[in-house]
Image (tube, rainbow, N blue to C red):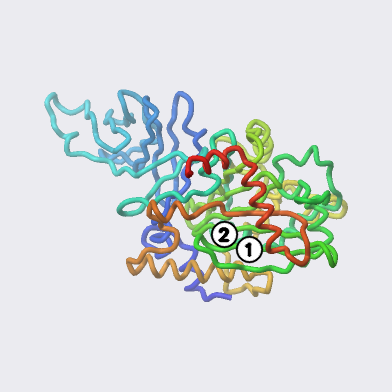
Amino acid sequence: MLSAAQNDLITRITSDRPAGKLLRCYWQPAALAIEVEGERAIRPVRLLGQDFVLFRDESGKLGFLDRDCPHRNADLAFGRLEDGGLRCPFHGWLFDTDGNCLQTPAEPRGSRLCKHIHQKSYPVVERSGIIFVYLGEGQPPAFPDMDCFLAPGPYVFAFKGLIDCNWLQALEVGMDPAHASFLHRFFKDEEQDTAYGRQFRATSADSDIPMTRVLREFPCPDIEVEPTDYGLRIIALREISESSTHVRVTNVMFPQAFVIPLSSDMTITQWHVPIDDTSCYWYAIFTSFDQPVDKETMRAQRLKLYTLPDYRPRVGRFNDYGFDPYEQAHHTYTGMGEDINVHDQWAIESQGKIQDRTREHLGQTDKGIIAFRRMLVRAIEQAANGQTPMMVLDPEQATHIRGPATMDGVGPTSGWEAYWRAVDLRRRNGAPWHAAETEKEE
């Protein structure tokens, strides 16, 4: 249970708030790369309580600018892509991707006004299907050598979805291994030919037991939380028998992401990115270790639940999350369909726009959340004091943040620690792209 002041400290993210200063120390997902494809490659972006415009110019270069034109503050998201930049429709002022004003065509001939005009721009890069932006001061940090960034394009798939609540409660659901046995419980298991791309549907490694059965029949895991140089490792152990235990290894990548297994051959790296204090997007990179991702299938699966262009969910508060009491009685624990994103969305949005943590009562299953909050407060204080917080990396440090390892498998009850590492190493060494990376290092 936190005080109201402590809750504000860790949830409020505008530029004048301590947590907002911290989050501006990191690269933030701003859009999917697919959102700036096509003839009109311009997107409005609201991020960390500020308004921006993202565009790709005629040469393919990305630009990320403050959204209000510096002339009379008209909206540049309605601009025209032409003549090497983004042109404001109000008076034709033209800006390149670095924010330089190239033309002020309504001014008298010979005017040098544009030489003195500069729109604020921000560093922006495209990685694994997501466009990241750095909103902080000084040089941006280096990207860590995580699997989702090292894997080549065919082996990654990116998607996102809108959530109608504060970013932190959305992130915290990923630090809680116990909830999956209830919130994501299915009363029947499915055939494996329908499992591709779906969370908790595949069989666990080294077994023929579908994850749905593991969660349903073993609802009380032992949870271990280990601090790491990138955040936290969370291990959930469900003892199946005296000789075998289900082991699930997930990670919290400070400050806003978690890395979890989707199946024995695919992982999810998922960020929770504040739009403002009361809404956020999740951005996910799915990384495959064995074969290229079937991106068409993955995108079609997810577009059944989200609408374009803003990736808004088709179910939510406005239609009771599709709740069906007959389904709740006979098919799923929630009665809210089969997609776990809907289940999570209900759980976190029903806590309120910003969860009132003065009213919560945490238990043993929340030890990952407790550890993360302490880590977050410490980093907020460091950023406020001008110190370098965790995971603000220089290029040398970035090369040492690898993986991180995830695992979902059934191994020996005695010796599970060595088992999960061996499973991760086996999968990693078998990945075509990982072998290529290893050869480059050598």
Would residue 201 be seen by someone viewing this image from the given angle?
yes
Q: Percent position (x, y) of residue 351?
A: 63, 62
Which quadrant, please, contains the N terminus?
A: bottom right
- Please tell me how crowded label 1 is: few (under 14), some (14-19), or many (20+) other residues with Cα within 10 Å: many
Neighbour tally class for label 2: few under 14, some 14-19, many 20 plus, Cα within 10 Å: many
Q: Nearer the viewer, residue 334 or 225?
A: 225
Mark 2 to mark 1: distance in Å?
Answer: 8 Å
Position of 392 with respect to 273 (left or right) is: left
Disc ID at residue 65: none
Residue 33 in the image, given as x and y percentages of width and height: 49, 35
Q: Which mark is residue 252?
A: 2
Q: Nearer the viewer, residue 399 or 346?
A: 399
Q: Is residue 24 visible?
A: no
Q: Quadrant of residue 239?
A: bottom right
Query: Residue at position x 68%, y 33% from top?
Result: 297
Q: Residue furthest left?
A: 110
Mark 1, residue position: 234
- Quarter where residue 112 is shown: top left
Name which residue type carries label 2. Val
Q: Residue at x 55, y 67 (%)?
A: 227
Label tally: 2
Residue 122, horizontal then vertical, whole percent: 34, 44
Which secondary structure, mark 1?
strand
Who comes first in sequence, dot 2 or dot 1? 1
Give the vertical position of 294 relative to 9 (above or below).
above
The residue closer to the viewer here, 328 or 288, is 288
Mark 2 touches mark 1? (CB < 8 Å): yes
> Which residue is farthest front?
442
Q: In the image, what residue occupies the spot 32% across and 35% down?
A: 97
Q: Is residue 74 placed above or below 417 in the rendered structure? A: above
**Residue at 65% from the left image edge and 69% from the top image edge:** 366
